[in-house]
Amino acid sequence: MAFHETRFPDNISRGARGGPERRTQIVELASGDEERNASWADSRRRYDVAYGIRKADDLAAVIAFFEARGGRLYGFRFKDWSDYKSALPSVAISRTDQSLGTGTGAATQFQLVKRYTSGAQTWTRTITKPVAGTVLVALNGVAQPSGWTVNTTTGIITFTVAPGIGIAVTAGFEFDVPVRFDSEAMDVTLDFERLGSITSIPLIEVRR
């Protein structure tokens, strides 16, 4: 799919609204009971970045970004300030934040993931857009400053030498969300001070 490895302006994304969306089918039976079925195995994030526009220059930057992406044609990176790293918001990232699996003695590639746990339930999110220079890796808790590379367009870590059998592979990182514009038009309203405004600029997560 067409994608530009370019991040939406941080100063505007910081004021955006949005978050995860789930799709569930609910059927109410004659008895009043419900049957619920998940249509999506994974959540999908939606945002509205119009709330981050505070001045005319912000508006111009968004229009330029929209034009450069061809509207909905090309996806791009977006920083979700409410959820952009492997650790809790108040904690610095650590190389042991997330488990990527255990070594087999043969596997050299491990996908970055982030786990969301509440009670006994856990959902695992695949991370495909780590931020360059932020990824930390450990084997059995021991820092690995070298001997591996990370593909910042897929989130796959590749080791030069396969981790041994039973070795715990962990990582910490910051990441972006792959999104695209979810509107074909920018509906700009010019006010009397010529600052301009846009009522809504929807973005939607791209699933690859």
Image: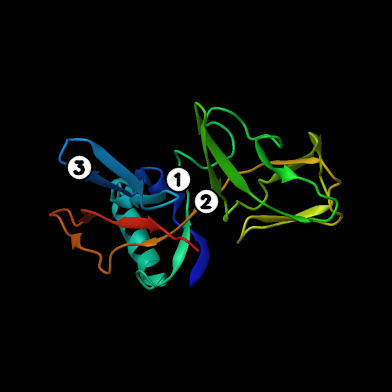
* Image point (62%, 31%), residue name: 92
Nearest to the eye among marks 1 and 3: give it: 3
Q: Position of residue 190 (x, y in %)?
A: 17, 59
| Residue 16 seen in render | no
**Does the residue at mark 3 contact the one at mark 2 (Cβ under 8 Å)?**
no
Find the distance from the CA under tag 2 to the CA under tag 1. 7 Å
Q: How many marks?
A: 3
* Image point (49%, 72%), residue name: 1
Q: Position of residue 8 (x, y in %)?
A: 44, 56
* Residue 86 in the figure: left or right of residue 68: right
- Which of the two discs, 3 and 2, labels the residue nearer the N terminus? 3
Quadrant of res 141? top right
Along the line of sight, which residue is nearer the eye, 98 or 152?
98
- Disc ID at residue 46: none
> In the structure shown, which secondary structural element does the residue marked by tag 3 occupy?
strand
Q: Which residue is labeled 2 in the image?
A: 176
Quadrant of res 108? bottom right
**Looking at numbered disc 2 in the image, what kind of residue is underneath it?**
Asp
Q: Which residue is labeled 1 in the image?
A: 80
Label 1 Cα crowd, 10 Å radius (few <14 / some 14-19 / many 20+): many
| Residue 56 seen in render | yes
- Which of the two discs, 2 and 1, labels the residue nearer the N terminus? 1
Find the distance from the CA under tag 3 to the CA under tag 2. 38 Å
* Image point (61%, 60%), residue name: 154
**Looking at numbered disc 1 in the image, what kind of residue is underneath it?**
Asp
**Looking at numbered disc 3 in the image, what kind of residue is underneath it?**
Glu
> In the structure shown, which secondary structural element does the residue marked by tag 2 occupy?
loop
Q: Which residue is labeled 3 in the image?
A: 28
**Does the residue at mark 1 contact the one at mark 3 (Cβ under 8 Å)?**
no
- Which of the two discs, 1 and 3, labels the residue nearer the N terminus? 3
